[in-house]
Amino acid sequence: HYINEAIKKGAKTIIYEGEMSKENHNINYIKVINIKRVLALFCRIYYRDITKRIKVIGVTGTNGKTTISTLLFDFLSYQGEEAVLIGTNGIYFKDEHFHTSNTTPSILQTYDVLKQVVKKGAKYLIMEVSSIGIRESRVLYFDFDILFLLQEFCSFQYL
């Protein structure tokens, strides 16, 4: 949808999925099988593996992600640890709060947040990881240190 605009702004390479007409011969075109997986890889490279510079705690499962992730965030904050929470209720870091559209934001939004909060001293990321977020590669290539898989009736597995 934005290819012509990107070319007008100086784009020299178009990475695409599916079929498209290649109208401009001065542009490189790279066809990929899954654009979201490629974006995740590019983000990891561009942001220099930032998830390796912060302890990443993921919370996934059908029910309880918001409760467990908020409790973990509150506990770490109470202990004086610099933590960021990303989930259904938004993004929280210190006294800052930002709205998100999804439980697990786009990979670009998450990496941008991580870049900012790591510069400000964040040591922990607590993140709600939705099944659709996993399916859409929003956390692909993240270096999780701890992953909680919540199951029915509030039991969980620590992976």
Image (cartoon, rainbow, N blue to C red):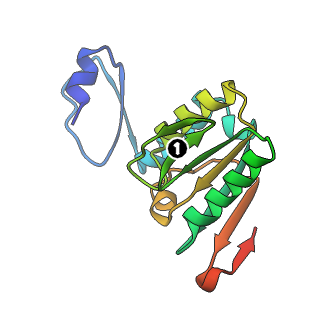
Looking at the picture, how far across and down is residue 128, in whole percent? Answer: 57, 57
> How many circles with numbers are drawn on the protein?
1
Horizontal relation, residue 112 to residue 17: left or right: right
Q: Position of residue 82 (x, y in %)?
A: 73, 38
Q: Is residue 52 left or right of residue 34?
A: right
Give the residue at x 52% y 74%: 62
**Mark 1 belongs to which amino acid?**
Ile
Relative to 1, is 62 above or below?
A: below
In the rendered image, residue 63, in percent from the top left (x then y), is placed at: 54, 74
Residue 126 vertical position relative to residue 120 in the rendered view, above or below: below
Quadrant (top left, top right, bottom left, bottom right) of the C terminus: bottom right
List the residue tagged with mark 1: 91
- Camera-side residue: 119 or 1? 119
Element assignment for label 1: strand
> Quadrant location of residue 2?
top left
Instruction: Using the rendered view, name the quadrant where residue 30 is placed.
Output: top left
